[in-house]
Image: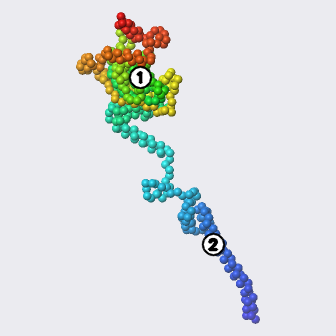
Amino acid sequence: MHMHRSSSSSSSCLPSLCSLHTFIGLAVILCVYFTLQTSISLQDKSLPSEQIKTVLPSSSSVEFLQPQRLQSKNIRLVDQQPFRPYEIPSTDQPPPYPKPETPTPKTTTTTKTTTTTTTTTTETEVLGGLAEDFVITWGDHRGKFHENGSLLTLSLDKHSGSGFESKNKYLFARIDMKIKLIPNNSAGTVTTFYMSSNGTTHDEIDFEFLGNTTGQPYTLHTNIYCQGKGNREQQFYLWFDPTTDFHSYSILWTPSRIVFFVDDTPIREFKNMESFGVPFPNKQPMRIISSLWNADDWATQGGKVHTDWSKAPFVASFRDFSASSCVWAFGSSSCDGSDPELMGSENGWLREELDSKSLEKMKWVQKNHMTYNYCNDKLRFHEGLPKECTIRRSKRGRQRQ
């Protein structure tokens, strides 16, 4: 009975066991199916690496999926942007990562370094010419030596002009410089070549070239300062175009006279008349100075025409400087106790005077090309013309008699 009862009991439980086994089997199949679906879905979606690590339990799967995504979709995991390999034309193999662009400050530094190097090289190459006698004093590189120092240029733009001066000081000299002035529209500009001492009571001997509009002539402005006082202007129109070629401009300054020359033609003479109470520059050593600057408030047609900055930079050129001079250094002149041959010879520059032929040339220039003479401006000098003007006229009157 007992055994039968046991057998009956086992036999009666078989259907339940079969159902349980079937249920467990189906559950296992469903779990496997959903697991496979989840894995396939993860491979198809472009998830960031952090999300992949969250979903997938195995780090080895992450290491496998990241390279696969880079190879198949060519995108970076960092920013999800298209990957563009950096290319260097001069190299066969590009670097393994994009090379960053050079920042702007670094580019500026490189440019400045290049400019400095170029300037240094230019100065190193200067061996002679004007570089032996002159130094550029202002203009932030707008003044430059060229052709191994034989050519010097000054330039002017809206921000600044430029200038140079002699290394030596002189107490009497004959100086010559060839200059080519600014071409075309030079209105408002002033190019200068002059001698000057320092201080408020300075002496000065001026060449100034006042620019003009295209097709209109330059005005050559001359002036002489004695002990800080000028007002001795004479102005001329040149008888040639001073912008197409170099022309010689000279100053003869001796104890007895000052003479201005253009291409060796005298245009003005100022004699020493100290015995008549007229001051004369003979005590202060002077440097040679040149500059290019903007003066459009007065320089061209009384300031009516202003500088056209669209034509900038304006450039004036200088070359072939020569000087016969008494150099001033350490409180004395190089001509003190100099060779009697120099001091005593009738042909020495310190004794130079205008001969009759030179005087005729000067008269021709003043008659045909002088546009202003302070000695004729009675409206300007209400209290009478300067003494040197009346002395000259009285001398001419006696000569006619």
Q: Nearer the viewer, mark 1 or mark 2?
A: 1
Furthest-top residue in view?
401
Q: Secondary structure at mark 2?
A: helix
Residue 350, x across and y down, in percent: 30, 18
Q: Residue at x 46, y 13 (%)?
A: 377
Residue 14 horizontal side relative to residue 101, left or right = right
Point out which mark residue 238 bears: 1
Asked where in the image residue 153 lies, by quadrant, the reply is top left
Residue 156, x across and y down, in percent: 46, 31
Between 133 and 331, which is closer to the camera in this rendering?
133
Q: Is residue 344 visible?
A: yes
Q: Given the image, on which type of amino acid does mark 2 rest?
A: Leu
Between 85 and 396, which is closer to the camera in this rendering?
396
Residue 36, x across and y down, in percent: 63, 72
- The mark that comes first in sequence, 1 or 2, is 2
The quarter of the rendered structure image containing the N terminus is bottom right
Point out which mark residue 36 bears: 2
